[in-house]
Image (tube, coloured by chain):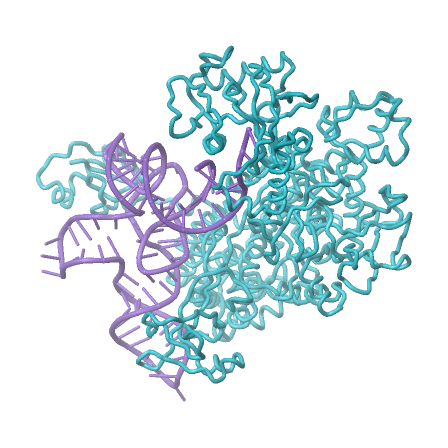
RNA sequence: GCGGAUGUGGUGAAAUUGGUAGACACGCUAGACUUAGGAUCUAGUGCCGUGAGGUGUGUGGGUUCGAGUCCCUCCAUCCGCACCA
């Protein structure tokens, strides 16, 4: 019997399911290991071949760790709240829960086929009330906490209230944008609403009027990481800036810790850099400029306080609150006009138009805090309201934008750099000596910055300050299919629902669209449609997609716990995720938010670690190869690639199932779509139609999606698993190409033949001692496979298996001792295949993964001679087999005595002979 | 503009600490076997050259007995950020 993968795979899949072979328990004396995949959003399209890449890799590692004696947690679930199900609901009226359930079934079916060792009893779904009950509960904790700067951790809001009651907020050291000072007496005089308004300025989850990314097409706000180049990440719709009252997360409070934490985790440089960039720390100093004829002061942030004497004007963002106050009568019209134009521009427009220099003079003057000079105050949209203080001190001699602005509007440029020309452009490098700068004269940049900050602080004009680019994350969405907030409003005061009423379940609504007044869909729910209703109304917004995914890795540890989101005992046992595998697209979204929530839960003592993912691997994307047919413009005639010859054609994606090796199945193509049924073709001379091809992202609309299903049908899951790993390094993106899959499939068949005869009977022999060559091959393989698995080089393991099978075949190895060990090496990659052979070898069914991973025994690899490469001037010329027991001198003597050596010396004397025993001999002529 | 990554045969790729470049596969060429298959087996396959040999890891340089690997220069591609003060 040949290797019958269909029978074998379905047999073992049901075996594992029935016996719950992959159930994981905390009651174990083994060391724990936690391998996690980024859980998928169950889309209607199902899995394509790119999805399993990471899942296969994590499954290989999970199984390897199991064999190596670890208690392995390897769970899977679904990030099941999301837009597509909701949009489908809007179109069809079908509840998104139904769509989601159907999609999950499909995903589960596909995942099951691949033979993963997930403990499905631990499955989580972010959209199930049992799960989002705890998402709501964590939200409540965030709502009930503020960030204490003194202890650098989150503290209960009740502590803050105590402080307010005792001594007001002057002494309070908390992260907040609230700048007014009140006393204990003031506090007690405030009514409930006033108090809550102040508290909102401190809570880690808070309501605020803020500038948000509003996407009219999607009818919702988006977080910064959900906006790519001014367009929505999903759908690519335009995004505008709008001021709205929204829930936000005070993630800014954690900026420094999110930055510092990056040093303690094993992530790629590129990912860490991306997060560093996103957090965007810059060290500098804030400086206050007074305004002529006003008590207000404009605060600016600068990283270059040393250049303060080079300031020749100031620029405010058009949205800066002082603008209307300070603008002089003559300038009001122009300023208003400019503000209006700026507000209409979307962020995208502002970005794409970097080159043109625009701005308007307000007519007001600031006073230079050190020199006392009068400085013009301008507004311009190159200054962003949302970064720093929304105002800059312009130093044209040291900053290119300021320089261009000054040139354009004829504002004076003051040079403060000694012996440096600034006729053509600004001096932006951080070097040079300061001049015309009073007490800073003669200092270099570093000294200048230091001295400037000291003096500014002494004179009460400024302070050393650190600025972060990271902004608080908008946390509400005007959508239906997300977690409802555990919040109700009582006379417009937001209040948290008591724990015993959680979860607040999604109420039934008659439509999933916003209301006529633009309220979110939840506003449609009748009072009694809510499972809990309190106050005047419930919160109508829902939480964003990243809410549920910010803590799901904790729930896997204790998925059925009805009393806690995770018990301390369980989270202490499993701890950090040891290995997390997923795509790089989450760099500034999910991965940052999950770190934030983890740090918060750590602060509150619910868990004992403050970084969730110890080691992270980004699997590369598997790209698809698309095929194109070329339609003559405005006709229904298609031209073969070789016959285009400069004719005007339109490239159209053709379904890749209709194309084999760029050859189009013309009949199939005509039947594919109605509009092509009467198409005509201009073919190559041999009558064939040749398509063009291009490597692109796999997508339904490009008709280039390869599903794993057909490959599993053709070759089996074990082949697919091996092949996806064999393709190349896990982190690398690569085009999908099925050409090579037969090689891997043949490998399994060849391997099968080592164990079984054509009847399917085991042909191995346990009576004779294994031959030393077989042992050598085995231990070489053990060593290499273990080393490669330990460094996640999963592709090279497959090569190693192939080499081993080739060698065993050549040796006609029949030793059951050797082949049993080899089976254990291969098992993480091809579990069904190996379980079957394990059983055939006579071991108890399904016990393969309870065995121990083979141990490398160096004695089998000991050699007494080595085939030395003999090189001349570094070029390898020939080889010579020499005993490894020889000393350097003896080797040199042996080599020099060889005929071939004399030949290559061409009669010359060697200048030098380098001998590295066991490695190489190099003769320098 | 800033930051990160990557450049090796016709293709996917190996080469972990500087020590035989191209393992392992795909593809291709030739052959064997055969009631013909997407099967198996044998040999070959970086490039140039009939050959000895020469040459070769994006470019140019350097360090070294020896460089794909280390250092400098430039180029290309991909990804992220970007009027960030």
Near-viewer residue (A217 or A316): A316
Determine the residue positioned at 49% across, 30% down. Answer: A402
Which residue lies at the image location 71% right of the left edge and 44% below the top edge? A243
Can you give x and y, in whole percent of width and height, for residue A724 in the image? 50, 59
Give x and y (percent) for residue A909.
11, 34
Q: Is residue A888 above or below residue A306?
A: below
Is residue A229 in sight in this rendering? yes
Please state if A689 lies on the left or on the right of A555 as rendered: left
How far across and down, in percent of the image, does residue B28 sit?
Answer: 30, 69
Return the residue nearer the eye: A99 or A889. A99
Q: Which chain shows up in cyan? A: A
Could you say which quadrant of the image residue A167 lies in? Answer: top right
State the residue in front, A772 or B14: B14
Image quadrant where residue A824 sits: bottom right
Judge from the rendering whether residue A177 lies leftward or rightward of residue A385; answer left or right: right
Q: In which quarter of the image is the C terminus of chain A?
A: top left
Q: Can residue A31 be seen in this view?
A: no
Residue A900, above or below A81: above
Q: In this view, does A15 lie to the left or right of A785?
A: right
Pick the residue in front: A191 or A598: A191
Above or below residue A419? Residue B23 is: below
Q: Residue furthest left?
A: A907
| Chain B on-screen colour | purple
Left or right of A913: which side holds A732? Answer: right
- Residue A538 image point, x, y percent: 85, 50
């Amino acid at each position: 019997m040949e290797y019958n993968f269909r029978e074998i795979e379905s047999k073992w899949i049901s075996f594992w399911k029935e016996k719950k072979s992959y159930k994981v328990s905390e009651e174990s004396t083994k060391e724990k290991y936690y391998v996690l995949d980024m859980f998928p959003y169950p889309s209607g399209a199902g899995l394509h071949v790119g999805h399993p890449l990471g899942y296969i890799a994590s499954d290989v590692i999970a199984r390897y760790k199991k064999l190596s004696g670890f208690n392995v947690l390897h769970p899977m679930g679904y990030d099941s709240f999301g837009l597509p199900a909701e949009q489908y609901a809007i179109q069809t009226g079908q509840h998104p829960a139904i769509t989601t359930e159907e999609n999950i079934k499909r995903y589960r079916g596909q995942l099951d086929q691949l033979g993963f060792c997930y403990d499905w009893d631990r499955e989580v779904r972010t959209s199930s009330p049992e799960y989002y009950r705890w998402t709501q509960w964590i939200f409540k904790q965030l709502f009930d906490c503020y960030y204490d700067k003194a202890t650098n951790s989150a503290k209960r809001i009740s502590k803050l209230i105590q402080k307010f009651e005792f001594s007001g907020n002057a002494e309070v050291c908390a992260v907040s944008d609230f700048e007014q000072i009140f006393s204990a007496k003031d506090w007690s005089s405030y009514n409930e609403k006033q108090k809550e308004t102040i508290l909102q300025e401190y809570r880690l989850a808070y309501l605020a009027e803020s500038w948000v990314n509003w996407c009219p097409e999607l009818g919702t706000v988006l977080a910064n990481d959900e906006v790519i180049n001014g367009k929505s990440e999903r759908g690519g719709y335009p995004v505008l800036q709008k001021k709205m009252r929204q829930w936000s997360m005070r993630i800014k409070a954690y900026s420094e810790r999110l930055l510092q934490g990056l040093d303690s985790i094993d992530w790629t440089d590129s990912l860490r850099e991306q997060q560093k960039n996103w957090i965007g720390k810059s060290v500098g100093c804030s400086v206050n400029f007074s305004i002529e004829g006003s008590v207000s002061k404009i605060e600016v942030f600068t990283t270059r306080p040393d250049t303060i004497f080079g300031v020749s004007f100031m620029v405010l963002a058009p949205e800066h609150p002082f603008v209307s106050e300070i603008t002089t009568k003559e300038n009001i019209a122009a300023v208003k006009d400019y503000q209006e134009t700026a507000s209409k521009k979307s962020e995208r427009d502002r970005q794409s138009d970097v080159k043109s220099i625009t701005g308007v003079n307000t007519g007001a003057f600031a006073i230079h805090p050190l020199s006392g000079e009068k400085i013009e105050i301008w507004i311009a949209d190159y200054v962003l309201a949302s970064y720093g203080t929304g105002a800059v001190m312009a130093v044209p001699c040291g900053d290119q934008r300021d320089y261009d602005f000054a040139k354009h509007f004829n504002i004076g440029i003051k040079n403060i750099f000694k012996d440096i020309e600034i006729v053509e452009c600004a001096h932006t490098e951080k070097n040079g000596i300061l001049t015309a700068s009073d007490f800073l004269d003669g200092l270099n940049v570093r000294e200048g910055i230091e001295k400037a900050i000291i003096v500014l602080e002494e004179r009460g004009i400024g302070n050393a300050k650190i600025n972060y680019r990271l902004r608080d994350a908008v946390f509400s969405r005007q959508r239906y299919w997300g977690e409802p907030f555990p919040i109700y409003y009582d006379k417009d005061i937001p209040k948290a629902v008591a724990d015993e009423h959680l979860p607040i379940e999604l109420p039934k609504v008659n439509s999933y669209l916003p209301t006529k007044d633009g309220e979110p869909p939840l506003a449609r729910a009748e009072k009694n449609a809510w499972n809990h209703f309190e106050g005047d109304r419930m919160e109508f917004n829902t939480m964003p997609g990243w809410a549920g995914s910010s803590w799901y890795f904790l729930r896997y540890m204790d998925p059925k716990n009805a009393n806690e989101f995770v018990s301390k005992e369980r989270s202490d046992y499993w701890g950090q995720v040891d290995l997390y595998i997923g795509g790089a697209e989450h760099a500034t979204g999910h991965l940052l938010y999950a770190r934030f929530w983890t740090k918060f839960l750590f602060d509150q003592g619910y868990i004992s670690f403050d970084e969730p993912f110890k080691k992270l691997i980004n699997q590369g994307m598997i790209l698809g190869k698309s095929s194109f047919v070329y339609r003559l413009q405005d006709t229904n005639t298609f031209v073969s690639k070789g016959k285009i010859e400069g004719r005007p054609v339109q490239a159209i994606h053709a379904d890749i199932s209709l194309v084999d090796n760029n050859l189009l199945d013309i009949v199939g193509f005509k039947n594919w779509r109605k509009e092509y049924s009467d198409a005509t073709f201009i073919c190559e001379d041999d009558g064939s139609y040749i398509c063009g091809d291009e490597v692109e992202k796999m997508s339904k609309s490009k008709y280039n999606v390869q599903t794993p299903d057909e490959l599993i049908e053709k070759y089996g899951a074990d082949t697919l698993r091996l092949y996806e790993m064999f393709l190349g390094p896990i982190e690398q993106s690569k085009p999908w190409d099925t050409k090579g899959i037969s090689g891997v499939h043949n490998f399994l068949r060849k391997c099968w033949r080592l164990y079984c005869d054509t009847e399917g009977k085991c042909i191995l022999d346990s009576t004779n001692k294994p031959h030393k060559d077989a042992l050598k091959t085995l231990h070489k393989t053990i060593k290499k496979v273990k080393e490669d698995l330990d460094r996640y080089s999963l592709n090279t393991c497959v090569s190693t298996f192939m080499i081993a099978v080739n060698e065993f075949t050549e040796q006609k190895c029949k030793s059951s001792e050797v082949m049993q060990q080899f089976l254990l090496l291969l098992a993480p990659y091809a579990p069904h295949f190996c379980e079957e052979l394990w059983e055939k070898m006579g071991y108890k069914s399904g016990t393969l993964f309870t065995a121990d991973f083979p141990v490398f025994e160096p004695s089998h690899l000991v050699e007494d001679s080595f085939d030395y490469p003999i090189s001349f001037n570094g070029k390898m010329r020939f080889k010579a087999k020499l005993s490894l027991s020889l000393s350097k001198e003896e080797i040199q003597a042996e080599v020099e005595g060889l005929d071939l050596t004399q030949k290559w010396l061409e009669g010359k004397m060697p200048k030098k002979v380098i001998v590295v025993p066991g490695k190489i001999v190099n003769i320098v002529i």
